Image: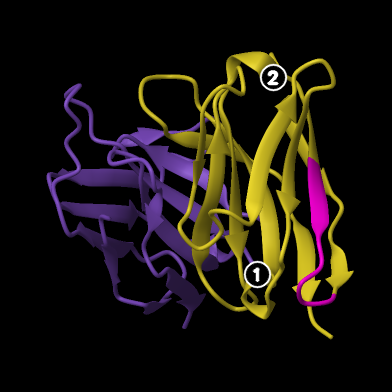
Amino acid sequence: EVQLLESGGGLVQPGRSLRLSCAASGFTFANYAMSWVRQAPGKGLEWVSTISGSGGSTYYADSVKGRFTISRDNSWNTLYVQMNSLRAEDTAVYYCVKVTGRQGWEVDYWGQGTLVTVSS
Amino acid sequence: EIVMTQTPLSSPVTLGQPASISCRSSQSLVHSDGNTYLSWLQQRPGQPPRLLIYKISNRFSGVPDRFSGSGAGTDFTLTISRVEAEDVGVYYCMQATQFPPYTFGQGTKLEIK
């Protein structure tokens, strides 16, 4: 059974940093690209970032480019996102999402999410 | 960036009756590999999103057969043949054809009359 468990969320002041983690199990982690998708309170879904299975390719939304860094540790089956220079508009639930591994970049499994609140 | 537009944004339905949600993309979602990477997600209250349908019409593992997807090019539809109480929530269409980025529809809230 595929499981994705996010952690690291919390309350942080504007301008500060936070690192989220996602522990994956139930599949061969290194074989799959992974993504972060966020959802501001009461709002829709917004893609944040994606990393290839090897970690060699990364992609970012314009809204986080230069501030967020996605990474992975395939030895520990863990996905990360380092979030720097946080802003109030980064307040959201952050979901860890698995890419299907079939053709293309479709996603299949979603974690439960971790809430990040940026406020003074 | 492809813009995804869903209608309606809210859909009150009667238990046991059908419901349908439309999703239109600003550009064709046919990929150069011939596939159309249009998915439907369900988000029940207080829960994370869950994949229902991928590549227009393929039901994901464990998804009841009352859910079906159809469409082509830029116009797509999610249909629930007989709505059950557990179907209440928000439904999103999502495209992965022109990645990056992934883009999502605004969401359609399904509620029981």
Chain identity for the colour purple used in the image: B
Looking at the rendered structure, the kind of residue marked 2 is Phe
* Rendering coords of residue A68 (x, y %): 65, 52
Q: Nearer the viewer, residue A101 or B83?
A: A101
In the displayed structure, A75 sits above or below A50; it is: above
**What kind of element bears circle 1?**
helix
Q: Quadrant of residue B24?
A: bottom left
* Rendering coords of residue B17 (x, y %): 36, 66
A115 on left or right of A46:
right
Chain identity for the colour yellow used in the image: A
Magenta region: A13-21
Residue placed at 87% from the left, 72% from the top? A11
In the rendered structure, which disc, 1 or 2, sits on the residue that comes first in sequence? 2
* Residue located beneath label 2 in the image: A29
In the displayed structure, B99 sits above or below A83; it is: above
Q: Does residue B56 show up?
A: yes
* Rendering coords of residue B100 (x, y %): 38, 43
As measured in the structure, the alpha-carbon distance from the residue carrying label 1 to the one carrying label 2 is: 27 Å
**What kind of element bears circle 2?**
helix
In the displayed structure, A1 sits above or below B9; it is: above
Subunit of label 2: A
Q: Nearer the viewer, residue A75 or A63?
A: A63
Q: Nearer the viewer, residue B74 or B64?
A: B74
Subunit of label 1: A
Looking at the rendered structure, the kind of residue marked 1 is Asp
Residue placed at 60% from the left, 37% from the top? A109
Q: How is the structure coloured here?
A: by chain
Asked if badges 1 and 2 are on one and the same chain, I answer: yes
* Residue located beneath label 1 in the image: A90
Q: Does residue A112 show up?
A: no
Q: Is residue A17 on the magenta stretch? A: yes
